[in-house]
Amino acid sequence: MDMIHPPPVDASALRARMRDLNDDYAAALDDLDFAGWAGFFTDDCHYRVVSLENFKEGLPLSTMECHGAGSLRDRIAAIKTTAVFEPRTLRHIVGGVRIVQPADDDIRAQASFAIFESLSDREPHLFMTGRYLDRVVRAGDTLKLQERICVFDNYRVRTSLVFPV
Amino acid sequence: MTTDTLLDIPPPAPATDTIKPVSTWQLRRWPETRDTSIPAWIYSDPSLFAREMEVFYDGPGWSFVGLECEVDLPGAFKRSWIGQRPVIMVHGEDGAINVLENRCAHRGSMLCWENKGVVKDFTCPYHHWNYDLQGNLLGLPFFRGAMGKGGMPRDFQKSEHGLRKLRVATLGGIVWATFSDQAPSLEDYLGEEIHGLVWRATGSGKKKLRLLGYNRQLLPCNWKLYLENSRDPYHATLLHSFFLTFGLLRTDTAFKAVPTIGGRHAIMASTYSAATAGQQNEVTKQLASLKTDFTLEDMEVVKPVDEMGDSSMINFSVLPSVFFQQHGNSLALRHLIPKSVSETELSWTHYGFVNDDEDMNRRRLKQANLMGPAGYVAIDDSEVLAKMQPVAESAPESVQVVTMGGTGHVPQDTMLTETLIRGFYSYYREKMGL
């Protein structure tokens, strides 16, 4: 998957549903509702947070990577149980949702994200920007993420990436 | 302001040999209990920082630059840094790796703006001075002027205006460089023990390195806070409960903390046993941070295989710029790049080997979740150091205590020691004259 924007296809209903999914996904992360966050993914999901630098060069290293729902739960458990970090509030803004392939059995979508971070004793700052590159499947009436690759634009992460993107 | 007041300003005093500017760091005094005290001003004094860059990064030591496999064909280059100074690592036409200061010899502008690429030569964007892959000045526009006007003086020698070329050495596929003519050979600078460990970490001459990717983070702290952290096994037994819980590093297994060359470098060697990894005993029960009820659904992230064949995980810190990481099967070089007295870039280059099989490749990538800006273990460090810096700045005369394990800096066979930090500051004070 390269970073050139493929032309959008006419799938306005699907596009509206992906906007809803992304808004709800952002709300779950803003609320630090990680069980809710994991609920957006399929059991066999692939979740990856990767720098634009690695992504463009095709390098396999991720900053955060989960294969399957169990691995998402491990990430959540580590955040809650063992990780030591400064309290913070995050605000996820997702926009520019596009459906680049509407095929029913293999929907491909993209969106841009911006994450603002407010540390315990600081004003908000822009923490990270990037793009979601998604493979989406229908699960009954809902859409689920089978793959979400979060490609962040930052050359460097500011201090730490504590929570999922 | 009137002209009169301007004229009132006395002329500058004539320069003499006896008057030299004094920087604030030269007025500092290390606390009396020298071997076990660290004054907080070393983390916040900009004049001290400037001196450190001269002594440790411009001085007679060797710095990490990159991996040979990152520039594996003629003309391939990568940008890097030695301290605050930008450099270019480039594969020359003759096959040798050159390291050039990324600074045009003309007006000092940054020559190369791309992080990586392949070129035939380098052209400065500002006035188009052009250099070959060895840094020699090939040509410049309007050398003889135009229409009989302008141009360089007749005696201008291109051979005298090349890029600054650094001394380069490679070891195990890793590229090192120094600005100094006085630096000993890389082998002597590293010393026998570190030289052997670099060789071990890079496949002992039997394997070729393979780049897996980068993690970069900007830490809001002085570079020495990170360097100390990477020489401090004591904190790892307490802060990093993820390590403890899954037995990747624990106080009840054999461990060695070895300062080398008077504290210049530092080795931390631990043993790993899959058999005892999950067990608890009298020692582990004392640790409040051990989360006995915490398990993982995907245990491969904490189950390494013994790829070096010695049941050991050996991590070591090479002054001034690099930490060799072996955590499970996650191998990485952590490049320490000071940006200012209070900001440090930490760049992780993760690697494996060309002949890694699919299982090993998966293991390396999965276990990389422990490290980097989002690491199960490494988050703890970046968060703690970020909260240390403002406190250090708020009370520069305050003093830290490093007495765990005694007052000297000899090798010790326990994690419960600060011998490596004491060793570093012994070496540091000697080189800085503090």
Image (tube, coloured by chain):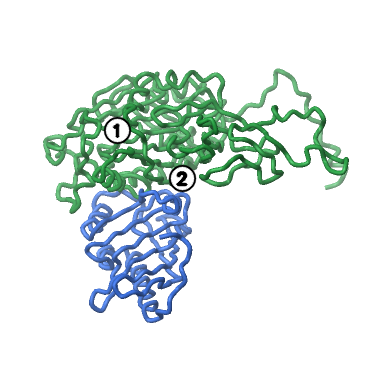
Chain colours: A blue, B green
The residue that mark 1 highlights is: B233
**Pointer 2 indicates a residue of which chain?**
B
Are discs 2 and 1 less than 8 Å apart at CB?
no
Residue B34 found in image quarter: top left
- Residue A90 locus on image (x, y percent): 39, 61
Q: Is residue B362 left or right of residue B252?
A: right
| Residue B9 in view here | yes
Residue B189 placement (x, y as % from top left): 44, 21
Q: For the residues tagged 2 and 1, is the chain the same? A: yes
Marker disc for residue B406? none
Reading the chain from its start, which is encountered first: label 2 or label 1? 2
User: What amino acid is found at the position of numbered circle 1 in the picture?
Assistant: Pro
Q: Residue at x 21, y 58 (%)?
A: A70
- x%, y% of residue B321? 45, 32
Q: Which label sits on residue B220?
A: 2
CA gap, disc 2 to disc 1? 22 Å
Choose between B311 and B124: the one closer to the eye. Answer: B124
Where in the figure is residue B175, as x and y percent of width and height? 46, 31
Relative to A24, say whether B226 is above or below: above
Q: Residue furthest bottom?
A: A13
Per the image, label 1 sits on a secondary structure element best described as: helix
Is residue B34 visible from the viewing direction of this image? Answer: no
Residue B331 against residue B412 in the figure, above or below: below
Q: Is residue B293 left or right of residue B166?
A: left
Of B346 and B307, nearer the camera is: B307
Local packing at callout 2 (Cα closer than 10 Å; few below 14, some 14-19, many 20+) is many
Q: How many numbered badges does the structure rendering display?
A: 2
